Amino acid sequence: MALLEVRGLRAAYGQTRVLHGIDFALQESSITALLGANGAGKTTTLRALCAMVRTEGEVRFAGERIDGRATEDIVRMGVAHVPDGRGTFLHLSTEENLRLGAYVRRDRNNVESDLERVYGYFPRLRERRRQQAGTLSGGEQQMLAVSRALMLRPRLMLLDEPSFGLAPLVVRELFAILAAINQREQVSLLLVEQNAAMALELASHAYLLETGRVVLSGAADELRRNDAVRRAYLGY
Amino acid sequence: MDAFLHQVLAGLATGGIYASLALALVMIYQATHLVNFAQGEMAMFATYLAWSLLNAGVPYWPAFLLTIGIAFVGGIVIERVVVRPVENSPVLAIVVVFIALLVILNSVAGWIYTYTLKSFPSPFPEQSSFKFMSPHEIGAIGITLLVLAALYVFFRFTPLGLALRAAAQNPESSRLVGIRVGWMLALGWGLAAAVGAVAGMMVAPIVYLDPNMMGGVLLYAFAAALVGGIDSPGGAVFGGFLVGVLENVLGAFVIGNELKLSVALILIIGVLLVKPSGFFGKVNVTRV
Amino acid sequence: MKKNIFLMLILLGVACALPFLVSNYRTFQLTLVMVYAIALLGLNILTGYSGQISLGHGAFYALGAYCAAILMDKAGVPYWATLPAAGAVCFVAGFLFGLPALRLEGLYLALATFALGVAMPQLLKYHHLEKWTGGVQGIVIAKPEAPLGLPLNADQWLYFFTLAVMLAMFFLGWNLLRGRVGRALTAIRDHAIAAEAMGVHNALYKSTAFGVSALYTGVAGALGAIAVQFVAPDSFNIFLSIVFLVGIVVGGLASISGALYGALFIQFVPNIADEISKAAPWAVFGIFMIGFVYLMPTGVAGAVRLLLARRRSP
């Protein structure tokens, strides 16, 4: 059984329809990339999964339907969303941001050990733990956003353009840690990226979106070798 | 010099009351960007409930705590029933709803309890050896500081307090960590109502209990919240004490006691014109 | 259009006949309805059309009322001359208050005007001004008699006088709001920044709107003082400002006929509610305010418009 199954997902902002019926699925412990140009509907897809936009269609998480549920309930089922723009609580401290990530968890003791583990992945956050989150650099805020999502102990992490605005070296570092998180914590990742090259290196599967529809899907290697994808999105 | 000191200290005592009500206003403003015009009447109504409890024979401190509890629940109910439906309406609609709440609470209090002044007891002794402040004034400052300290601890050191702060600052990100933002708002209203009740019970022994008791206090609280920065809780507290002292000192030595409310009026307009973000608030930029 | 004029002439005819058909007290109440209608139109110009919230219009009403009272009592000015004087004073006061208010939006303006409304009675009781304002006791003024020996009693004369003033002011207001000024104000209300970008001088329009709005309410105050024959500080507290707010919410924002509906409401509902309990009128007001905001945000005027529109197109 797939961890996430999406069938006929449609979404609209007011009168403007953005998604025209998307189908995809992802397996437990996998890394899946959602690629496409600006405006293709990638961010909308992630927001639709978390019920942050009006949707129609079926979404199943671990076999249960989550379309129609409130965002807060979907989170409680183990879906963590690292949003577009990071969604940092700018006026709170780094550590307060992290603790908020664990807000819905009942096992208080493990939260402390998770905090340590997260600092293990991102030592720079430990240095800045009492600092106001808004004063962190872009890369640090991205790490904070990922860490906050991790604090939920999610089964699925949705990441919206994690490479945005970051230097290539920082992106490499981040993606290496994402791979490690996926391996060690068994967290599935659904990655939305404009930076197709890096995404396809990290992911095992990928879907290509164009104007609200899935136009191509398959193993990451396949897509990397696909001529159309290479020319349009990989630049060679 | 003696007289001046007395005015300053008395000003601190009433300032504590203004600080409490201003804090309630700021808590709601931070979460909703709305000014609760009915805050004073909510506090007044809670004080009348306390009076009923005391009249029924409940001893002071249990009645005090019970009133805070009832006010807390009342605040939550008001948010869910009256405010929630108009959350996304234009500003005028929301202002009208708050004014309506003010008016309804005021008239219901008048209907149930009549408009004759009632005396409300102070839990503090009648006399003290300290010649500059009455026991009630000292007690009022004490209670105010206690309440403020409790709130500070709650917001800074508890997960729920953290969630409340988060929900006020960034509702969308809060949803993404599973915070039920709607209930956080209700909780904020509950806390604000509880704090208001404390302010009401501290002021009632001084000005006598009457449905229009909080009108002037509300105005001072507005001035205090603006002076301190409408989105800064610390600022509200600072503003409260400042306004209390200014009111007394200016009233006694400069403009006479009759025009004391005008001090509030001038402060409000002055702050809004010169530095709308107050001492400690943040400046807002409107994006087109 | 012709149907409208016909309808209005009929209403005018009825209005003229009324004082001869009902008691003096009723005539007095109807005069007050017209006074409130003028005041509500004033508030509507500011809040309904121009989108600036005022919770302190009672202060301008008070200013107009006291102008009239002081001029009549201390300077022997004839009653009809106090109206332009009250209007002028209130226009200046409103314009001046409007200048700083320019920088305040929505909630902040509501706050500032609320403060004005709350502080007004205290200002009026200030003992240094007592020899003019009469302090807490206020001023009593004489009711004007019908001129030229017309066969009308004082109440009836005042009714027609007020009717004439109201018609004149409504007509002026209607012209003002229909034309460029009205459109500019609505543009500012709906999107200030865009309006400014399109060349509307926000500052000038907004201050002038305040001034005109205060003028209308001030004239109403003067008329009200003459009708009631009495001014005292405590009649002009924050609740008066709230009454005006109730009036435009119930009557209908951004509507001229709304001012009349609202005025009828605020004059007669308290009388009916009073029979239930002394505190009831305000509870009723409060419930109506909430009810209208939820269920009929465009007020009675809006509902009437909808009904008429539905009847025209089946």
Image: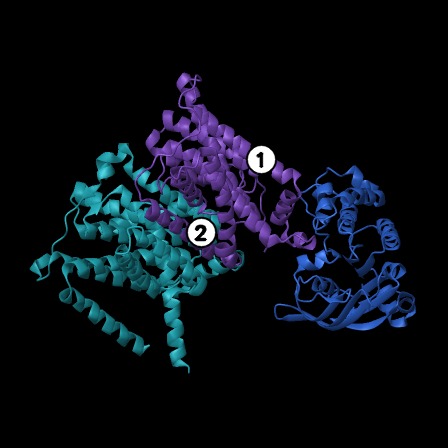
| In the rendered image, the vertical position of residue A30 relative to residue C110, given as above or below | below
Q: Chain under label 1? A: B
Same chain for mark 1 and mark 2? The answer is yes
Q: Nearer the viewer, residue C193 or A127?
A: A127
Task: Describe residue A215's horizontal placement relative to residue C63 as left or right.
Answer: right
Give the class, few, some or many, for how many residues have Cα within 10 Å of label 2's Cα (few <14, many ≥20).
many
Q: Residue at 80% x, 45% y: name it.
A: A114
Apparent colour of chain B? purple
Measuring 34% from the left and 53% from the top, which residue is drawn there? C282
SS assignment at label 2: helix
Instruction: Give left or right: position of C194 versus C121.
Output: right
Taking the image as shown, residue A190 lies to the left or right of residue C294, namely right
Residue neighbourhood size for the residue with mark 1, other residues' Cα within 10 Å, grouped as few (<14), some (14–19), many (≥20): few
Q: Name above or below for residue B49 compared with residue A61.
A: above
Which chain is in cyan here? Answer: C
Reading the image, the residue beneath label 1 is: B150
Name the image quarter holding the N terminus of chain A: bottom right
Indicate the position of residue B185 as horizontal and vertical percent values. 57, 50
Q: Position of residue B262 (x, y in %)?
A: 38, 36
Q: Quadrant of the C terminus of chain A?
A: bottom right
Residue type for callout 1? Ala
Write down the colour of chain A.
blue
Q: Indicate which disc, 1 or 2, sits on the residue closer to the N terminus.
A: 2
User: In this orientation, does residue B25 appear?
Assistant: no
- At x 47%, y 58%, the residue is C189
Q: Nearer the viewer, residue B183 or A63?
A: A63
Residue ID for mark 2: B98
Which numbered mark, 1 or 2, is in the foreground of this view?
A: 1
Q: Residue at x 42, y 38 (%)?
A: B217
- Circles 1 and 2: CB atoms closer than 8 Å: no
